[in-house]
Amino acid sequence: MGRPRPAHAIPEKMHPISWIFKKRWVRELLLLRKTLTGKRRYNKTEDYGVFRDNSCVISHLEQSSYIVTDLEETKAWFLTMGFTHARTCAPEPHPDHEGHTLTCAYLNARDHEECIVLMEHRDAANKIVLPSIEDVFHAAYELDGNTLKDAFNYTEEMTAKGVKPYYGPAKHNNSVPYGDGESGGNVAAYYYTPDYHHIEFCTDMDTVDNYEGRYGTGIRTTANDQYLKDNV
């Protein structure tokens, strides 16, 4: 790996027992402190409808950017995961730090060119600047096929190449046998990049348009009830 293992990363020895995190009581126990202090936020599938006409909803993103400690190592990781290399630029001056440079590699997904940018940041002494991985928890990428089987096949293919998920594949709902009690409905597998960025590969996500067909229209949360009261 390109950098020391951060404290929040799940230890390698725990990977074989990562299934325990599918247990709802385990997750609730781990999140108990945030729940009791009011810092925990929920994002349940049945709430999605309230976002349909919200002007703050982001429609799409053009790129994901990652600061890395070893451009070639991380590029090779993404290529293994199914992306393709578009181009790598020569070192350029950092826009905010005098004497610093950025070297950028651009990667393509199947239907989205240069959707990932890997940036190797060096300071004025040409030393690598370590990336921060604490601001955004993870990025998720949808797989071709978009079915449960496709997600499991992808995980098996990556494992055969020597890249194992630290969690999953699991389905983010209460279905048996793969459901882990979370929301979203997608089948997801989570990986660490060489710099311990969290990357999710998933299929079959619940959306604003399909969640009622999947779960019924009778399920309403307080957020939904208030939205309907105010808008219908």
Image (spheres, rainbow, N blue to C red):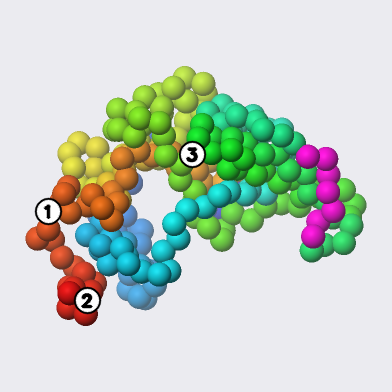
The x, y position of residue 183, in whole percent, is 28, 53
Q: Which residue is found at the position 56% from the left and 61% from the top?
A: 135
Q: Tell me which numbered mark, 3 or 1, is placed earlier along the sequence.
A: 3
Q: Name the residue furthest bottom.
A: 230
Q: Identify the image quadrant of the C terminus.
A: bottom left
Q: Which residue is found at the position 40% from the left and 31% from the top?
A: 144
The x, y position of residue 195, in whole percent, is 62, 43
Q: Nearer the viewer, residue 112 or 125?
A: 112
* Residue at mark 3 to residue at mark 2: CA–CA distance: 41 Å
- Residue 109 colored magenta? no
The x, y position of residue 6, in whole percent, is 59, 50
Q: Mark 1 sits on what residue?
A: 216
Left/right placement of residue 64 relative to residue 102 reads left
Q: Mark 2 sits on what residue?
A: 231
Q: Mark 3 sits on what residue?
A: 191
Q: Which label was assigned to residue 109?
A: none
Q: Quick one: label 2, few (<14), some, or many (20+) residues within 10 Å? A: few
State whether the magenta stretch is mostly helix, strand or loop. loop
Q: Which residue is found at the position 51% from the left and 21% from the top?
A: 161
The residues colored magenta run 89-95
Say which quarter of the image contains residue 85. top right
* Residue at mark 2 to residue at mark 1: CA–CA distance: 20 Å
- Tell me the SS state at disc 1: loop
Q: Quick one: label 3, few (<14), some, or many (20+) residues within 10 Å? A: some
